[in-house]
Image (cartoon, helix red, strand yellow):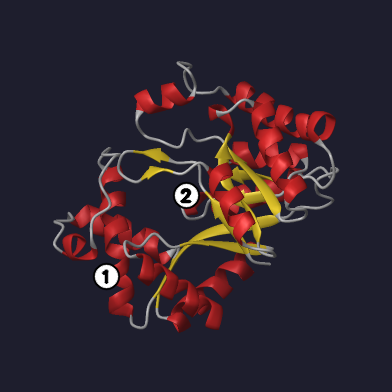
Amino acid sequence: MSTVADVDHHSPAIGAFPPVVLIAHAAASTSAIRLGSGGVLAPNHAPITLAEQFGTLAALHPDRIDLGIGRDPGTFDEATARELRRGAGPATDAQYHDDVAAILSFLVDEVARGPLPEPWLLCSSTAGAALAARLGLPSAVAHHIRPDNTFTVLERYRAAFIPSRWCEQPRVVVCVEAIWAETEQEATWRAGPMDVVKAGLLKGLSEIPFPTPADAATHPFTAEERQALAGFRAQQACGTPEAVVRRLAQLAADTGADELMLTTPVYDLDARVRSYDLIKKH
C-alpha cells in the first residue's frame, strides 16, 4: 500500500502545515494513492470538527483517507500551543482519551454519509498503546521519535488489543526515518541538517532553523551529541539503497509491522524526491 501522510506541525522554524488542507489538495490532484494525517493532533481541535473534516474528505474520496490521531501539541513554543488550544493548558490523559473517543463517536453518529476515513492512533508510549488497544484502533508507532520505546509499545498494544468495528486484529505501522543516497557519504551529508535540529533538542533548544547541509557540516557537535546522534541513526535507516533496504527489512521483521512509514527530513526537495525514487526502485 502507498500512503502519503501529513503532519500537524506549527513552528516558526519550519512553518505550519494543516493536514486537512494538504490532504484535500493532494486528493484532488491524484486518483489512487491513500492520503492521511500522520497525525492530526486532537488537543488542538474540536472533536466534531475533525470528524466533519475527515468525514467529508472520505465522502469525496472514498476508501482513500486515513485519520491519524495524535496527542503532541505540534509545537515546542508554549505560547503557540496555548493559541492552538484557545488559552487552555496541555491536555490531561483523561481529556485526550475523551477527545479520541468523541472523534470516533462523531464519525459514526453524526458524520457518516458513506465510506468513513480509517482512524489510526499515533503511539510513542505505552499509554498511547494501551488506548489504541482499548479502542481497537490500528497503531502508528513513532520509532522515528522514540525508538527505544518501540518494542515495549508493540508488546503492550498487541497484548491488550480488543477487536472493534475499526479493526478486527492488531495492525501496526512503524514510522522510520529513512535517508537514501548513492553513497554513504552523501546520505550522511543529507542527514546533517536534521542532526543539528536534534542536537538542539538535546539542549532544550526547540526552534532551531533547519540549516543547509553545508552549514550543518561545520556545526560544532559535542562528543556527547555525536554519540547520541549515532545511537539514534543506528536505529533508523540511512545510507546507500542496499544498506537501507537491509535495515528496513530487518526492522519490519523484528517488529512484525504490517507497513513501514518513511520520513525523510532532508533540506533539498530534489534530494528528498531522489531518495523516494531510490526507495521505489528497490
Picture coordinates of residue 149 (x, y %)?
52, 49
Callout 2 amino acid: Arg
- The residue closer to the viewer here, 179 or 51, is 51
Picture coordinates of residue 124 (x, y %)?
54, 45
Mark 2 or 1: the one toward you: 1
Q: Which mark is residue 146?
A: 2
Q: Which mark is residue 138?
A: none
Q: Secondary structure at mark 1?
A: helix
User: Which residue is at 18% across, 65% downward?
Assistant: 214
Quadrant of residue 123 within the rendered picture: top right
User: Which residue is at 45% across, 37% downward?
Assistant: 74
Callout 1 amino acid: Trp
The reply to whether dot 2 and dot 1 touch (C-beta < 8 Å) is: no
Question: For mark 2, does the 10 Å Cα neighbourhood hold few (<14), some (14 to 19), or many (20 or more) residues?
Answer: some
Picture coordinates of residue 155 (x, y %)?
66, 51
Which quadrant of the rendered structure holds the N terminus?
A: bottom right
Residue 91 relative to residue 10: left or right? right
Q: Which mark is residue 189?
A: 1
- The residue closer to the viewer here, 228 or 144, is 144
Residue 215 relative to residue 33: left or right? left
Q: Earlier in the sequence, mark 2 or mark 1?
A: 2
Say above or below: 264 vs 12: below
Which quadrant of the rendered structure holds the C terminus?
A: bottom right
Picture coordinates of residue 15 (x, y %)?
37, 43
Quadrant of residue 49 within the rendered picture: top right
Residue 40 relative to residue 228: left or right? right
Q: CA distance from mark 2 to mark 1?
A: 23 Å
